[in-house]
Structure formats: structure tokens, C-alpha cells
Amino acid sequence: MIWNDLKSPFLILAPMEGVTDVIFRQVIASAGRPDLFFTEFTNVSSYASEKGRENALERLEIAPTDSPIIAQIWGKNPEHFAKTCAALEDLGFSGVDLNFGCPDKHVNKAGGGAAMIKTPELAVECFRNAKKSTNLPVSIKTRLGWAKVEEYQNWLSTLLNEHPAALTVHLRTKKEMSKVAAHYELIPEIINLRNKISPETKLIINGDIKDKTAAFNLHKTYPEIDGFMIGRGVFQNPYCFTEHTPTREELMNLLKLHLDLFEQESKKHYVSYEPLKHFFKMYINNFPGASDIRAKLMETHSVTEARAIIES
Ligand SMILES: Cc1cc2nc3c(=O)[nH]c(=O)nc-3n(C[C@H](O)[C@H](O)[C@H](O)COP(=O)(O)O)c2cc1C
């Protein structure tokens, strides 16, 4: 079981929609991989419908360097959770994670992500359906609550009573989005809840942890935390899962790899070039002339054009 194989404290690249796809994960694996990858989230009703399945399967594509990797899914239909989970083991995943924390308004309007905090009975039903339809360990990623921090006591207890294999807590409410500092002050209470209700559940802390050093420092203060999830820190430093400070040349080579992988993926199916531009700042930053190069790259429409600018 993957969660027992990981040595504490383990590090995870947070699932990020539009970011942690099969291309980006290979880039990070090349820089220095985390102990565990998560996919972007895939909608269970999309997988369960004939029309949506092809797209869902594209999102669930994995590369050899991804393993071990957890498939993250979201939705609100318990049967669709079961149907999707039943397929994941054969696709090569080591586990399945249920997203009960996404604050996106479209996702919440559809009853998924953080909206599950307001429908705990449905959340439990989805979790049970997922669990009974697969041999894979089922974990949950969530927030402290919907509107108030204090909700965490009931909400996390409800989830822990289901004994998930792992529970990732993003230390903010849905209402707080990412606008306030993560509530580290609640870590001792959350550890207590886990120890009391489901000591076998791995506890993963998420929110404002920028790199391996920060995670390991937090672990020194709270050694009972099993793992740490890093999200936006990867944009500041794609080597954040190592203690290495990359040189400008290493970052440039990583960008070239990103472009190569993008091109390879585009040969398999359509991938939009525009979102690729969000990544340029990650590689070209903090040196004289960096913003001029980025401005030129933002004008490009293809990998070929981007390569020409980098080479010049
Ligand atoms: C662009 C973006 C996309 C995200 N997509 C997802 C997602 O698909 N599933 C999920 O559970 N969380 C998602 N998140 C939330 C992150 O996984 C993480 O919980 C959040 O960024 C806080 O961690 P950080 O402070 O280390 O960034 C996303 C965050 C960002 C910035």
C-alpha cells in the first residue's frame, strides 16, 4: 500500500488544475521528483459518460517517471465515483484521492469540491462508494471548512470516522481562498483529532509550504505529521523538492525540456499553446534582461517560435 511505503516526512506535488498534467510532472521529475505525484482533478461524471470519457482519460494519462502517482477525482454523484474508481487500478495508479476542497465557483455550483463540506452525508456516501469499488487506497484532500475555521472540528472528524488512507488538510477555509496565511496554529489540534479517531490515517499538511527545507522545518516542530504537500512553491523553484539551488542554465534546460515534452504531447492530442505561457516566469526570472525575454516569449504562438527566442 503506497501510503505505508512512503517514509515520513514525505513530500507531494499538490494537484493543480492546468499545471500538474503529464507534461509538467515529467519536468518536475527531471528537476527532482517529490515522493508522490497527484494528477489534476478529473470529474467522475465526465469519466462515467461516453461523451466525456476520452477527455477524462487524457487527464489520467501517466508517464513512466510519474509512478507512484495518485489520481485525484471530483464530483457529487456516488455511482460515478464508483465507476471511475473501478477503472483506476488498471490505469496504473497507486491510489485515488477525493477532492473535497476546490473553491472554484463552477465546481462548487456543480456540488463538488469544497461544496462537499456543506453536504457531509453525500461526501461520506461518495467516499464509501469509491472505497468499495477499488482495491486502491482512498484518500481525501480538503480544507478546514466552508466559511469558518472552527468548522474543522466536525468536518475533519466526519472524514476521519471513514478512516481514509490519507487526509490532506489545506489549512484554510473555502471562503479564505488563498488570501490569508495558512492556519498553522491548528496543526496540534488536527494531529490530536487524527490520533484519536483514525491513527492509521496518514496526515498531510498543505498551505504556504514553499520547499523541502520549509517542510522539514515544520516536521521538526510537528513530528507527527506524515507528509507535506507543496503547490505554488514549485513556481518559485521547480527544484523545490530538493535542496538544490538551480543555475540559470539548469532552468533554461528545464524550459527546453518543457517545450520538447509539450511538442511530444501535442502529437498525441490537441494541447493549447496559450497556457504554456504561464510557465515562462518559472524558468526565466531574477536575472538582468529576464523580463524582456519573457515579454518576447509572450508574443509567441508555437514551440518553434519560443525555441528561436531562447536560442537567440
Ligand atoms: C492553479 C491551481 C490549481 C489548483 N488545482 C487544484 C486541483 O485540481 N485539486 C486540488 O485538490 N487542489 C488544487 N489546487 C490547490 C492546491 O493543491 C493547494 O491546495 C493550494 O495551492 C495551497 O497550497 P500552496 O500554498 O502550497 O500552493 C490548485 C491550486 C492552484 C494554485
Image (cartoon, rainbow, N blue to C red):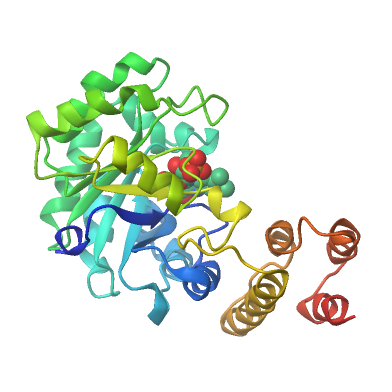
Q: Looking at the image, how many numbered discs can be counted on the residues?
A: 0
Looking at the picture, how far across and down is residue 39, in whole percent? 41, 60
Quarter location, residue 284: bottom right
Q: Quadrant of residue 246?
A: bottom right
On the image, the x and y values in percent for residue 120 come to 24, 27
Q: Position of residue 219 (x, y in %)?
A: 31, 42
Q: Is residue 58 left or right of residue 251?
A: left
Nearest the eye: 312 or 248 = 248
Residue 87 seen by the camera: yes
Q: Which residue is at 39% across, 65% downward?
A: 50
Which quarter of the rendering shows the N terminus?
A: bottom left
Q: Is residue 212 left or right of residue 296?
A: left
Question: Quick one: 101 or 171, which is closer to the camera?
Answer: 171
For residue 48, above or below residue 103: below
Q: Residue at x 89, y 59 (%)?
A: 295
Residue 114 position, x and y percent, is 40, 32
Q: Which quadrant of the view contains residue 62?
A: bottom left
Q: Is residue 39 above or below residue 90?
A: above
Give the position of the C terminus as an image quadrant: bottom right
Q: Is residue 290 above or below residue 216?
A: below
* Residue 112 visible to an observer of this rendering: no
Could you say which is closer to the camera, residue 249 or residue 67? 249
Residue at 34% in and 60% down: 71
Direction from residue 296 to residue 84 in the image, left or right: left
